Image (cartoon, rainbow, N blue to C red):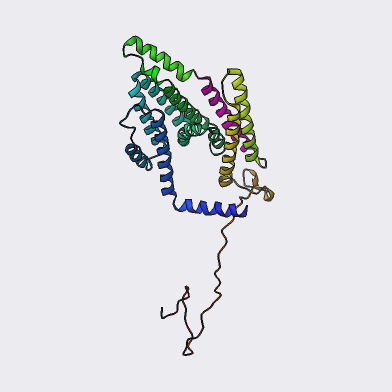
Amino acid sequence: MATLLVVKEQLAGFYSRFEAYLNAVLKFLLTLVALLIINADLGYMSKIDNGAIVLIVSLLCSFLPVNLIVIILAIFVLLHVYALSLTCAAIVGILFVIMFVLYLRFAPSDAAAVILTPICYIIKIPYVVPLTLGFVGNPMSCVSVACGTAVYFMLNYVKNNADQIASFGNDAESALGSFKYIIDGLLGSDQMLLMIITFAVVVISVFMIKSLPVDYSWKIALGMGVVVNVLIILIGCSALEVDMSIGGVLVGTIVSALIVLVIQFFIFNVDYSRTENVQFEDDEYYYYVKAIPKISMEAPDVNVTRFNPRDEYDEYGEENEYDDYGNDGYN
């Protein structure tokens, strides 16, 4: 544990020194992965399905706010969908505008969750996002998770039904039929509804429990978040007749919980054995404060011992003078 604490302090110091550069690298990687996924899943417009364009856009996004990166990624999605179907692009564009208004209104600081949620879905651990936001966000963070979930299911629907969507004609009757078909497919997913409800309950329950003034509240909140996540999905699958792999849900939830434990170690690591309850007052109030010290450990100082010291006197009997590196005045 001591070694881990030293590594934690060293990483925190390294990040504080190079924060601007590291944030740029993280935004570059986030944009790059998101664009590669979009092009791989959709890829209907060949002009933007290009490695050079993806790299250039990712480099530009490394200097932009995350909210603006979300908009750029949405434009890429719309361009691909437009190449497939104008009607589908119009519907997806309207849904994107609604989602942007919602998350910019309620959770503008959680824009990264909108991008990370579809990525985590692809690697089968979407539960890590709501569990993490329950600790670092607030109850309104469930809006960002819901938007990210909706984006994933929209992309998945368009990819799986591309042939049917592209088969509709451009006349008014075909446009109306395609509109109904796409709306029913995008908004009629019981699994999407189940996951949005589950993630909202997980975010709110984890936030409420971790805010309680009890020892180990963060650990208790994580455990309850895991239980709530699995239970709601099991009940929802039975009630809505949603076909989901229960084994995949259990494994994904456990892996997500382990990742959140690592995140907790870096952002909330305290020593409950040294808890102090402090009471003081001013002219208007009495204050009762519970103080819990953080666990931290500095890297030990390294002392260099010279086992073969140089001679203190030279051949003429005069005292040698050495600098801090052991060099005499003649070198």
Q: How many labels does the image show?
A: 0
Task: Report if residue 193 lies within the magenta region.
Answer: yes
Residue 188 in the image: state x and y as whole percent.
Answer: 49, 17
Give whichever of 188, 15 is nearer the camera: 188
- Judge whether 98 appears above or below 274 on screen: above
Q: Report the residue at 54% width, 39% height from top.
A: 136
Residue 101 in the image: state x and y as whole percent.
Answer: 43, 27
The answer to whether one can see residue 140 in this image is no
Q: Report the residue at 65% width, 38% height from top.
A: 220
Q: Report the residue at 46% width, 18% height from top.
A: 185
Task: Report if residue 56 lies within the magenta region.
Answer: no
Give whichever of 48, 5 is nearer the camera: 48
Q: Quadrant of residue 234?
A: top right
Residue 250 in the image: state x and y as whole percent.
Answer: 61, 31
Q: Report the residue at 56% width, 21% height from top.
A: 243
In the image, 235: left or right of 48? right
Q: Quadrant of residue 72?
A: top left
Residue 195 in the image: state x and y as whole percent.
Answer: 54, 26
Magenta residues, dominant SS class: helix
Give whichever of 49, 229 is nearer the camera: 49
Outermost residue, bottom direction? 316
The answer to whether one can see residue 52 in this image is yes
Q: Quadrant of residue 162?
A: top left
Outermost residue, top direction? 173
Find the magenta span and give its range: 189-211
Quadrant the C terminus occupies: bottom left
